Amino acid sequence: GGTVGIIGGGQLGRMAAMAAARLGYDCVVLTPEADSPASRVARETIVAPYDDPEALATFAAAVDVVTFEFENVPAPAVAWLAARRPVRPSWTVLERAQDRIREKTFLNDAGIDTAPWRSVHGPDDLRAALAALGGPAILKTARMGYDGKGQMRLDADADPAAAWAALDTDAAVLEGVVDFAMEAAVIVARGPGGTTATFEPVQTVHIHHILDTTIAPAPLPDETRAAARALAVRAADALDLVGLLAVELFVTRDGRLLANEMAPRPHNSGHWSLDGAVTDQFEQFIRAVCGLPLGSTARLGETVRMRNLLGDDAFTWDTLLADPAAKLHLYGKRAARPGRKMGHVTWVEIGPSAD
Ligand code: ATP
Ligand code: MG
Ligand code: MG
């Protein structure tokens, strides 16, 4: 046992805290949100901005190890904590995941392919990048984007000045649009000693840039799934990561893997594992961060399907509860806004039945 400090109060923190409790750990959550999904399962919640010195001191004093359920934590706060408690994953990992320019540079340096891309710091850069990559291309803010926010698709003849003004940022990337056969994701856990365990790569289906469905295993050839696992291990090793790393992938029509982005934490694409794997991603996360041996990631069913429940399609919950095979997970969010992740549901198909 011991106490795990989780920075961030969302559903990922909530499910991590539930896993920690099962392993005999308490959790203390630091979040600016007064009534958060994680706060209702944590032993204690410190409600304050992430850079509040007093809150950081209280937090550090209360925990044995610090981790994150999201990566956009300010650098000084992480540095302050790291001087006092083990911070897993480390700042160098977060730093590369916070900024798409650093992220893509890291991936390419590690020998991992991405879509062709250019860093963009103004309209002139954008004009040059559009000329170099051709259209259509996607312009993404370097920082803080999620669920497709902070992105715009540009044709080759787009007006760079107008597009740059509309994006309203000082740093961005322009990347070529990938004509993918499938999107996929893979999660790897890595412990303090460098041992790794990968989860089954999954197919991810996005609607309006938000994850809608995952299917485990991804319907891909064995060698492609093995390559996806190897890619994730390569990235985690190159980061010297302790914790969990999710890598979002494009599978090209000729079967190559391109990394889209990475997240050094539990990831929506791994929620299927709560019902569909021997060790789920949240338990594995806690195991890695606490230096416990990693668990088996073996799949429990022939196929496992997960669907997100967003604010706009909520209130199908009664129907889902009436489906005896549906495993419903709700995050305890008070307000259902369109596009907001309210919960998810999993179906585990056990396989050919004996009767
Ligand atoms: P999140 O962090 O919530 O996954 P995000 O805002 O960081 O999302 P991305 O993952 O970069 O956004 O993009 C969201 C989705 O948009 C992708 O999953 C994919 O469906 C599509 N997309 C993004 N970049 C490209 C690309 N270069 N080519 C084709 N499709 C893309
Ligand atoms: Mg992202
Ligand atoms: Mg993404």
Image (cartoon, rainbow, N blue to C red):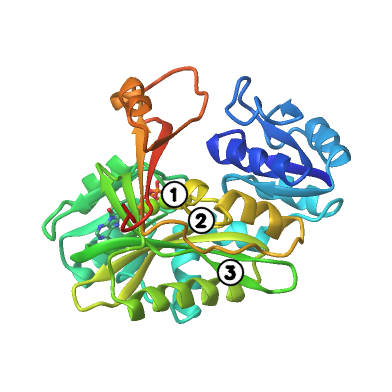
Q: Which amino acid does label 1 sit on?
A: Trp
Callout 1 environment at 10 Å: few (<14), some (14 to 19), or many (20+)? many
Camera-near label (2 vs 3) is 2
Q: In this view, does 39 lie above or below 84?
A: above
Q: Mark 1 points at which residue?
A: 272
Callout 2 environment at 10 Å: few (<14), some (14 to 19), or many (20+)? many
Residue 38: x and y in percent read 62, 31
Does mark 2 have its CB less than 8 Å from ligand 1?
no
Residue 214: x and y in percent read 34, 51
Residue 187: x and y in percent read 50, 62
Question: In the visual, does 61 lie left or right of 144?
Answer: right
| Mark positioned earlier in the residue sequence (2 or 3) | 3
Q: Residue furthest left?
A: 157
Q: What residue type is labelled 2?
A: Ala
Q: Name the residue under label 2.
A: 277
At numbered mark 3, what does the secondary structure look like: helix, strand or loop?
strand
Residue at 41% over, 44% down: 146
Question: In the visual, does 249 lie left or right of 84?
Answer: left
Residue at 69% over, 60% down: 288
**Picture disc at residue 305:** none
Disc 3 to disc 1: CB gap under 8 Å: no
Does mark 3 have its CB less than 8 Å from ligand 3?
no
Q: Is residue 204 above or below residue 239?
A: above
Q: Mark 3 points at which residue?
A: 197
* Disc 2 from disc 3: Cα separation: 13 Å
At numbered mark 1, what does the secondary structure look like: helix, strand or loop?
loop
Q: In this view, does 132 lie above or below 341?
A: below
* Disc 3 from disc 1: Cα separation: 16 Å
Question: In the visual, does 199 lie left or right of 35?
Answer: left
